[in-house]
Amino acid sequence: MESNLLELLTRLGPAGQAPRLDAGAERVAAVLIPLLASEPGHPVLFTRRAASMRRHAGEICLPGGRLEPADQGSVIRAALRESYEEIGLPPANVSSCWALPPCQNSRGDLIHPVLGVVNRPRRWRLQAEEVAGLLEVPLAHFLQPQHYKLERRCYEGQDKQSLVLDYGGEQIWGLTARIMDALRLLLLAEG
């Protein structure tokens, strides 16, 4: 699988195509799955949210946020803009993008994951108010179903069952784990 990663990605369909959304659509967001495809292990880059964040403080997630009018209804533009704002990833360093099927978070927001083939910039510039650090996880880790497990967690005062991934003492859970599992299933179906 790894030796033919880019070939496999092209089977996802033409890069750059994504649904156009109403620029004023509420409760719509996009996240980037930054894939460092040319590096050993094809790591995926995640952010650790700052401890001062109102929601999901300290959690591991993907860079992203709500669509803004400047995105002109493009989830790809939104994911690239948010990634530049949060981690300093220049859009020119993203060579190909695929909009994956959307999913909903626990508040009912529609989240559009965008898989992007990324070339590492000279340095990452983290927006300190939102991002405390970065975590790189080899793509192969996400392709192994045994790394996914369901756990009961208390979130916002409610007991919920959540998908969880463990990696090197870190936990990726909730929506981010569901997005990575959906990518895993999509890549395995195409392979």
Image (spheres, rainbow, N blue to C red):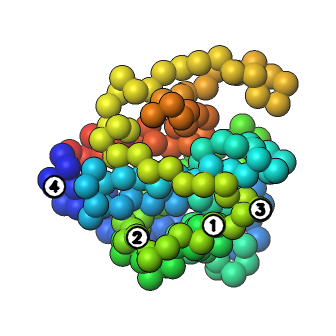
Residue at numbered disc 4: 4
Q: Mark 2 and mark 1 in contact? Answer it, CB < 8 Å.
A: no
Q: Which residue is mark 3?
A: 129
Q: Which comes sooner in the sequence, label 1 or label 4?
A: 4
Residue 84 vertical placement versus 146 (above, below): below
Q: Residues within 10 Å of mark 3 (few under 14, many from 20)?
A: few
**Image location (x, y in percent) of residue 163:** 55, 27
CA distance separating discs 3 and 1:
9 Å
Contact between labelled residues 1 and 3, with CB atoms less than 8 Å apart: no
Disc 1 versus disc 4: nearer the observer:
1
In the visual, does 112 lie left or right of 107? left
The disc label shown at residue 126, or none: 1
Q: Earlier in the sequence, mark 3 or mark 4?
A: 4
Residue 64 image-quadrant placement: bottom right
User: Which amino acid, mark 3?
Assistant: Glu
3D distance between C-alphas at marks 3 and 2: 22 Å
Q: What residue is disc 2 on? A: 120
Q: For the residue carrying disc 1, how many other residues have a C-alpha within 10 Å: few (<14), some (14-19), or many (20+)? A: some
CB within 8 Å, label 3 to label 4: no
Residue at the location (76% across, 28% down)?
Answer: 155
Name which of mark 2 and mark 1 comes first in the sequence. Answer: 2
**CB-based contact (under 8 Å), mark 1 and mark 4:** no
Q: Nearer the viewer, residue 138 or 173?
A: 138
User: Looking at the image, which residue is at 30% across and 54% down?
Assistant: 42
Q: Is residue 85 left or right of residue 138?
A: right
Give the SS element for disc 4. Answer: helix
- Label 3, secondary structure: give it: loop
Amino acid carrying label 4: it is Asn
